[in-house]
Image (spheres, rainbow, N blue to C red):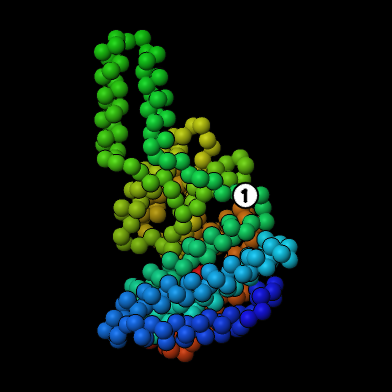
């Protein structure tokens, strides 16, 4: 396969390349796994197909650097490679272990987040990634701040100690351990630091995740030394009361569907929605067997990006 800037428009060539790679991988795995080990075989197949994508991307990035491609040109190539690889990965897994609706909806949802995040890896704007703070650091800073405030109060030493004990009890109620402040994406535009959580959709089992996001968002909101803003990017426009809870919390700014793509364009400078409309066509790009599975099990709605 020729590695040049024209890859960004060569969907057919990339699909053919990854299908050939998948056939090679399946042949190798047939020597390692029996038909009864289809779950292990499917897992190994997914990993190998993803690795073939990473190998191609590393060559593309090296070529792009040598030929001085723009970030937009690199991104268009990377998106096409990623999408073609996703198509073949879904096909190959289905051939080994046919998808049911739960596994299929979850897998397609999992593919959406890293796909969108590529826009932030190759932006045309001046955004940059940053390392999120550790909870231990935030807790220590807030504890010092409270302790300093209490020490300045004109009250007895005993009362100061009691207030500090009460403060420690509150931390104990909040958590019995460390809280993960790292989310899906962290970037800054030089003025504001954005914390982003991607979500394919809010279904029936989101209580735990919602409570965690409320806690994490509240912690970021109370870090006064930095200007943090928490965002939730949702693919689906059909969500439930858990998203409404986050929308009404005052700590997370949420967007769904086309609004999410508008936000991505605003921050990165790339119109990912237009790219998807022009290039993503799952049903026509799938091989016949995969297309039959999707149609027979009525899975088309899960392919709406």
Left or right, residue 28 beside residue 192: left
Q: Residue at x 54, y 46 (%)?
A: 130
Left or right, residue 89 beside residue 10: left
Q: Which residue is mark 1?
A: 127
Image location (x, y in percent) of residue 287: 49, 87
Image location (x, y in percent) of residue 54: 53, 69
| Residue 302 seen in render | no
| Residue 188 seen in render | yes
Left or right, residue 117 beside residue 73: left
Image location (x, y in percent) of residue 185: 50, 52
Q: Residue at x 26, y 40 (%)?
A: 176
**Does 127 appear above or below 110?**
above
The quarter of the image holding the N terminus is: bottom right
Closer to the camera in the image, 2 or 31: 31
Image location (x, y in percent) of residue 48: 45, 75
Q: Residue at x 51, y 40 (%)?
A: 228
């Amino acid at each position: 396969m020729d590695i040049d800037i024209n890859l960004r428009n060569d969907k057919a060539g990339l699909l053919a390349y990854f299908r050939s790679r998948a056939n090679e991988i399946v042949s190798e795995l047939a020597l390692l796994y029996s038909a009864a080990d289809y779950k292990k075989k499917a897992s190994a197949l997914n990993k190998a197909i993803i690795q073939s994508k990473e190998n191609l991307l590393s060559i593309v990035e090296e070529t792009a650097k040598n030929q001085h491609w723009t970030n937009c040109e690199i991104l268009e190539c990377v998106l096409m490679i990623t999408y073609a690889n996703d198509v073949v990965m879904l096909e190959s897994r289905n051939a080994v272990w046919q998808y049911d609706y739960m596994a299929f909806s979850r897998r397609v949802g999992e593919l959406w987040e890293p796909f969108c995040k590529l826009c932030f890896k190759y932006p045309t704007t001046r955004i940059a990634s940053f390392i999120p703070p550790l909870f231990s650091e935030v807790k220590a800073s807030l504890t010092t701040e409270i302790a300093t405030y209490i020490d300045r109060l004109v009250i007895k030493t005993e009362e100061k100690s009691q207030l500090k004990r009460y403060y420690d009890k509150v931390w104990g109620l909040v958590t019995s351990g460390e809280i993960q402040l790292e989310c899906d994406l962290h970037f800054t535009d030089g003025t504001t630091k954005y914390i982003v959580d991607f979500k394919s959709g809010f279904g029936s089992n989101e209580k735990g995740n919602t409570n965690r996001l409320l806690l994490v968002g509240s912690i970021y909101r109370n870090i006064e030394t930095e200007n943090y803003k928490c965002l939730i990017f949702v693919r689906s426009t059909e969500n439930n009361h858990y998203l409404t809870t986050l929308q009404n919390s005052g700590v997370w700014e949420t967007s769904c569907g086309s609004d999410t793509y508008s936000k991505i364009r605003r921050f990165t400078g790339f119109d990912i929605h237009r790219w998807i409309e022009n290039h993503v066509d799952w049903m026509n790009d799938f091989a016949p067997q995969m297309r039959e599975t999707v149609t027979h099990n009525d899975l088309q709605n899960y392919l709406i990006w």
